[in-house]
Amino acid sequence: MSSHRVLIIGGGPAGLTAARHVSDLGFHATLIEKQAQLGGTPIASHYAALTHGFRDAEDAFRDLIHQVTDDKQIDVRLNSRVVGCEGRVGNFNVHVANGAGAETLDAGAIIVATGFEHFDPARETQIYNYYTYPDVITLADMELMLKSKTVTRRSNGALPERVCFIQCVGSRDRQIGNEYCSKVCCGVASKQAIEIKQLVPTAKLFIFYIDMRMYGYWENEIYWPAQEKYKVNYIKGIVTEVIQKGDKLLVRGEDTTMGRPMEVTMDLVVLSVGMEPSAGTKEIAHALQLKQNKYGFIEVPHESLDPTVTSTPGIFVAGAAAGPKDLDDTMSMAGLAALRAMAAVRGAN
Amino acid sequence: MSSHRVLIIGGGPAGLTAARHVSDLGFHATLIEKQAQLGGTPIASHYAALTHGFRDAEDAFRDLIHQVTDDKQIDVRLNSRVVGCEGRVGNFNVHVANGAGAETLDAGAIIVATGFEHFDPARETQIYNYYTYPDVITLADMELMLKSKTVTRRSNGALPERVCFIQCVGSRDRQIGNEYCSKVCCGVASKQAIEIKQLVPTAKLFIFYIDMRMYGYWENEIYWPAQEKYKVNYIKGIVTEVIQKGDKLLVRGEDTTMGRPMEVTMDLVVLSVGMEPSAGTKEIAHALQLKQNKYGFIEVPHESLDPTVTSTPGIFVAGAAAGPKDLDDTMSMAGLAALRAMAAVRGAN
């Protein structure tokens, strides 16, 4: 007997959006989330403004959460994990564990929306000293500061006079095994630089980069204003170490445009950490026996032409579980994955 | 009386994909294309390999075309133009002109998939001499050469020894009014450089760029192999003029990494022209009274969160009609737009 349920794994932006779309077309959706709350990384990591458009992230994603929790056609299971799966497209049996025990849910199709996690700079600690110096922080730490509208030095609570971002921490790096570009960090760092300047107008902002990947409208909507209106200094350069000097941080490297060594003092250093597959993405690949690419993200065999298809018919992927994605990508993929899941349920695929 | 038809305007990758998705969920789709053939820019401009994955573009899009033309639920109208529209979501009356005259079609929702056109380098002719020198060509001209597996100098039919690409022609340029980044040109140029090297192994390849925007997996799948396997030379620099010198082209500018003037001779110069809204996109915005952004692309009010919604309820946009998009974006947006159009037809939105 075939099932008309679409099972969605992950309650972040991709999963919430996919669930809503499934319901909008009259299909039944079950959303499985392993945490006690919905919203995924943007809510759990206290994101401030969205990179594109600067809308308040909590406000935007709370709306999305309510659309899902208010919808009687969507069955939301918190504190739940998918631990196994049998069957095939049209008729999957999915084993879900939760506090109360375990149950098996039927589903005609499955959408994996288990997201990414931020690269842990401990793996490059000898260069950047993230766990040694309190004023070396990550993009995620800065989101939390921006969310609380208080950007201060962790070491002494003072307003920072000079703040820099170091791009490509954990991305474009063969040594740590992440050759890919994490796609969003140039945009996020630039957005944060603008927000810092709005909160601390006296601060001087610097972004050390290899290439500024401000594609499409990020160029005119974020990159140009960052330079022209907010006077953010973009320096093409490579940072080789960050060390403490008195109560300041000394950033050493090479300014590749000027072709000379660079040594600058900073009050706050923000590491633009990239995306890696979340623990949930790796777990679910195992539980559903989905192929992963060499980085551990869900493998998408026909990426450009069919960006949500996985190695298993009837199982689709949306958002950063498939690799580095921005919010536009995630929302579009959630729509496509929802649609393809429903078509699979109908037997069209 | 409400209509269950989704009307899709534009028979390129976005429109074809949207039509197929609409049909897959059992809704009726009508596809309007002003040309005599389907396939849009990739077919009309003879694209060679897809940038991501290197699959043959004609092969990929012919498949898509056949899926649509073989589907009895999809009504395809070639040589047809939308000239006006009344009504509202659930009940649009769309006026379509064709050779035989005109007719009015009902539609519950509309998807605009009218695409982009390549920037015309005539607007920067004094610098690059596109219309003066036969060996100054565009990315689109190079696609045609690659498609025919014959990369030669137009001036004398010889194999080129030195080929360069000049990035950001018509993009990131306030003077011509296009401040945005066209998103795909870094990837397309790198892909073409690889294809040229495969066809003419003795050729030396150069790409003059501001930032290489090889986001996500383009970094590890295209940019690294281009450098390591195909020895493409990437030079961060600004080209200020291209002039004829004997039977060669002299490219003058500044190598910004080395901080010195640059003067190099080339056999072929490829201008990496960006994206502008197509004539069809501007026409349709007028016919449907849709808001356009300052560049003439269809305005998307809530871009990151809702990338296919236009200024008019019930009218959605997919692909490069909304701005610079890559193929992944286009295919995901086509899915989302199809889904939202069907939800609108059902009255959910």
Image (tube, coloured by chain):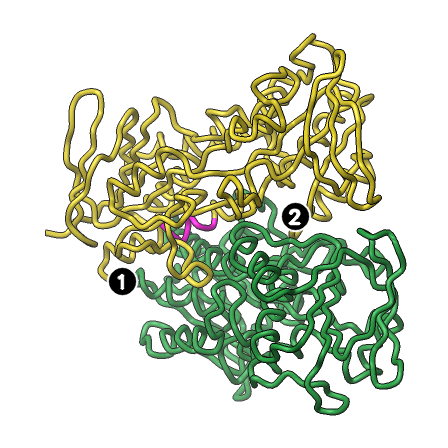
Chain colours: A yellow, B green
Q: Secondary structure at mark 1?
A: loop
The residue located at (74%, 34%) in the rendering is: A253
Q: Quadrant of residue A93?
A: top left
Q: Quadrant of residue B338?
A: bottom left
Q: Secondary structure at mark 2?
A: loop
Is A335 inside the magenta-drawn segment? yes
* Residue B59, image x, y percentages: 43, 77
- Amino acid carrying label 2: it is Arg
The residue located at (55%, 37%) in the rendering is: A170
Residue A51, compared with residue A340, is above or below; it is above
Q: Counting other residues with Cα less than 10 Å from the Cα at mark 2, is it few (<14), some (14-19), or many (20 or more)?
A: many
Mark 1 lies on residue: A349
Residues behind callouts 2 and 1 on a single chain: yes
- Residue A64 lies left or right of residue A144; in this view the side is left
Q: Residue furthest top?
A: A156
Q: Which residues are magenta?
A: A332-337
The residue located at (76%, 32%) in the rendering is: A206
* Residue A230, image x, y percentages: 80, 33
Comparing B291 with A148, the one in front is A148
| Viewer-nearest of discs 2 and 1 | 2
Q: Magenta region, mostly helix, strand or loop?
A: helix
Q: Counting other residues with Cα less than 10 Å from the Cα at mark 1, is it few (<14), some (14-19), or many (20 or more)?
A: some
Residue B133, compared with residue A104, is above or below; it is below
